Amino acid sequence: GQNIDQPTEMTATEGAIVQINCTYQTSGFNGLFWYQQHAGEAPTFLSYNVLDGLEEKGRFSSFLSRSKGYSYLLLKELQMKDSASYLCAVKGATNKLIFGTGTLLAVQP
Amino acid sequence: SAVISQKPSRDICQRGTSLTIQCQVDSQVTMMFWYRQQPGQSLTLIATANQGSEATYESGFVIDKFPISRPNLTFSTLTVSNMSPEDSSIYLCSVEGRGGYPEAFFGQGTRLTVV
């Protein structure tokens, strides 16, 4: 079967760094995506990894290890507005996106 | 990027009725995707809508319950038929990026409550 696992909830402090992990088992692999979703809003794209390594985009970085079926999203200099759900999604062999359960991040002052 | 307009943004419906959700994209796209997001859950793909052919449904979703139309390359509808309270969810349409961009773009979603 296909499975994508993320922690359900995380809490972090404003200004700190937080790492959200994602492990996956899918039939085929055509890329891993991270999306941010604020309550009541549509998901918005954050990052994309298809090769092993780290992709950096401002305060957000994403890492991928295909051999381990593992990714993480790193958020630096946390701001209150970063409180949201973070969705890990894998594009499998059929090129369809399979979403993880999402991690609800609460940033506290 | 793609701009996706989805409507209605929300609705409260009586059980046993049907609701049609519309999705309009600002450019021509080959595939459009419909997702369901149940309360507190992540996104589950319902079906893929291709212009000129029948939609392809994922396991657990059937055409009689979720008929889809795709009359042209910029528009699609999803109907939620014979609704029950279990159908209360957010429904989102999505398209893939263009010009080699791999990410998916989402409409703002339709928040459906069935009473």
Image (tube, coloured by chain):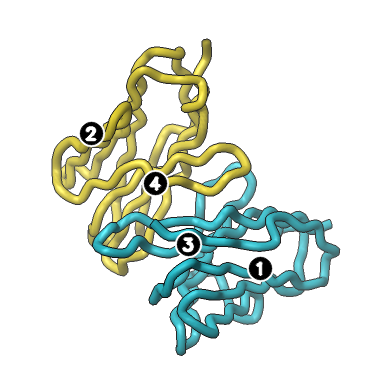
Mark 3 falls within which chain?
B
Residue matched to label 1:
B21
Co-location on one chain, circles 2 and 1 = no
Q: Quadrant of residue A95?
A: bottom left
Chain of the residue under the numbered disc 1 shown in the image = B
Of labels 4 and 2, earlier in sequence is 4
- In this orientation, which residue lies closer to the viewer: B33 or B26? B26
Q: Name the residue under label 4.
A: A45
Distance from label 2 to label 3 (Cα)?
Answer: 25 Å
- Residue A40 versus residue B70 in the image, above or below: above
Disc 3 to disc 4: CB gap under 8 Å: no
Residue at mark 4: chain: A
Q: Which amino acid does label 4 sit on?
A: Phe
Q: Identify the residue shown where x is 18% and y is 35%.
A: A54
Q: Where is residue A74 in the image (x, y as percent from the top left)?
A: 31, 28
Q: Please check whether the numbered discs 3 and 4 fall on a single chain.
A: no
Q: Are marks 4 and 2 on the same chain?
A: yes
Quadrant of residue A65 within the rendered picture: top left
Q: Residue pushed farthest front?
A: B26
Task: Please give the letter of the chain rendered in yellow.
Answer: A
Q: What residue type is labelled 3?
A: Ser
CB within 8 Å, label 3 to label 1: no
The residue singled out by tag 3 in the image is B94
Q: Name the residue under label 2.
A: A56
Q: Is residue B69 left or right of residue B73?
A: right
Q: Check disc 3: other Cα within 10 Å, few if <14, some if 14-19, many if 20+.
A: many
Q: Tell me the crowding category of disc 4: few under 14, some 14 to 19, or many 20 or more residues within 10 angstroms, Cα based.
A: some
